[in-house]
Structure formats: C-alpha cells, structure tokens
Amino acid sequence: MKLSLSKGHLRGSAAYSFLAGGLLALGLTLAGCASDAPPPPPPPPPPAPAGPPVALSSQISDAAATYVAYIEDARKLSANFADGSAVQSELQTGASFEPTQLARGAVAYGAIVAMQEPSFRSALRAYAADPAARADMVQKLLSDPNYATGLPSANVAARRIILALSSDGQSVYKAGANVKQAAYDIQHQNWSKEFIPGRDERLALAKQNSVTLKSVQSDQSAKLLAAALTGGGLTVRAATGQATGERPRAILQPPRRLTRMPISAVPTCSTSPIPKP
C-alpha cells in the first residue's frame, strides 16, 4: 500500500485509509479475544451548564417600572369631561412625570424587552461566560454605545424594542389626541364657560408634578426583574393596543435588504464569473 507523505504527516485520503484500517484491525483483534459479554456502556455525561448565572441590578427594573407605570396611566386618560374637576384630575395624571426619569425608564425597559429575544440572550450569555470578554464588552459599550448594534442578533432584539416602544407611544398619542379634541368639544358646554377658582394653584401643581420623581411600584419592578432574568413573562402591546406575549418570529425578523448585482458578478457552480457577452 502506497501512502502519500508530506513532512512526516499523512496526506489526503491515505490518512483516512490508514486510520480506518487501524481501527478495523483493532476491532477484529478485540473481537477475537472476547470471551464474556461486553460491559455495559458508560453512563451519559451530565448536561452542559446553561451558562453563567444571570444578575441584574434592581435599579434597572425600578427605572423600567416607573416608565411602565406612566404609560399605563397615560393610556387610560379619559376625555369624557363632565366638569372642571374631571379636567383637573386628568391634567394632573398626564403631567405627573419627570422627563429625565421617564427617559431613563424607557431605556431600561427597552433593555428588558431585548432580553426576551432568545438568540440575543444566548449571545450575551456566551460573552458573559468569559470574564475577560465580559470586561472588554463593558469597556466598549462605555466608550461607544453604538457597539451594541454589532452584537449577534442585535437587529432582531432591536425590532422587539421598536415594536414595544412604538406601540406605547402610539397609545399615549391616541389618548392625548382624544383629550385635545375634548378641549374643543367642551367649549360648547355651559360649565366650561364658568370661572375656574384657583387657576394659578392648579397650574403650579401641574408644574410641580412635572419635576417630581415618581415612586417605584415594587410589584411591577419585581415582575420586570424576573422577566429580565428568565427571558420570559414580559407582556407587551401590539399596535392595536391588545396585550400580547411572545411575538411570532416571522414578525420580528427584520426585512432583508435587496441590492442590485450585475449579472457578470454572479458566480457559477465553478465559482467563475459569467463571461460578459
């Protein structure tokens, strides 16, 4: 049998033939020497660990909880004003948010929404398994937040965030549009033409509510924390305003970008370009 050698190593199919022949000979020898029943197979190895433990600061879920609380309150704003007291009540509800706190809450909520994407979550856990890689990622994110867009499955996770936040924004916008229309409609009612006592105090209270931090709802924060740690259990709203859980993957997949390619650049089966006519 002729073997092709190169620098002391078997080359090509000869190496596979040599290996197969050796294993076959070893198997025949062992079979000829066997006299008793073969031993039972070894037990299967234990399953591989799912990954490093997941941890999240409660400050993230607390911030997200304040965002969720405001969205729920704003979504329920009523435009059915029967008197000045009803206007005052809804005005204070709509004005009760501090802009910076609301913005931070939206960012925190978006991060928890992203963790509901299985592929993105798995990619992050792979990074977290290596302390050096984890530290490197943190440093890169601190230096350039746009670094997150290059992470595996970041585009799919971003799609989830877009769907969730845009749905929230649409529902708040709809509630605000109804209140705006009611501001014109109530002008035809007699009670709206009466003098409103304490107008300055009402305005001052609305301004005060817009700079006062909202308290954290502990039960909502706990639910969001569990959703972030487990990757499930978070309910978002579709554009219709109906509550939904996990979304179909077909909806979450970003649309493919189609680019034009000259026919001369399309490779054939032999990877050679089609000759130009």
Image (tube, rainbow, N blue to C red):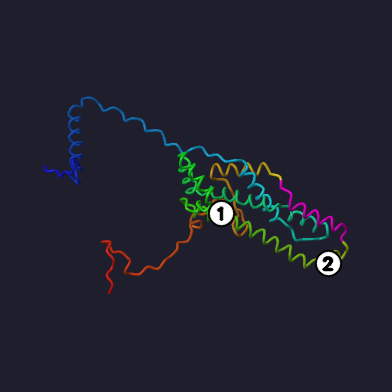
Q: Earlier in the sequence, mark 1 or mark 2?
A: 1
Q: Element at badge 1?
A: helix
236 lies above or below 182: above
Left or right of 92? Residue 170 is left
Residue type at mark 1 is: Ile
- Mark drawn on residue 161: 1
Q: Which residue is mark 2?
A: 189
- Mark drawn on residue 201: none
Q: Residue at x 55, y 42 (%)?
A: 229
The residue stretch that appears in magenta:
196-214
Which of 165 and 202 lies nearest the eye of the viewer?
202
48 lies above or below 67: above
Q: Residue at x 28, y 27 (%)?
A: 39
Residue type at mark 2 is: Gln
Q: Element at badge 2?
A: loop
> Residue 198, how many percent across, how many down?
87, 57
User: Quick one: which residue is furthest to the top in this view?
Assistant: 36
Which of 276 and 92 lies nearest the eye of the viewer?
276
Q: CA distance from mark 1 to mark 2?
A: 43 Å
Rendered-image quadrant of the C terminus: bottom left
User: Quick one: which residue is furthest to the left in this view?
Assistant: 1
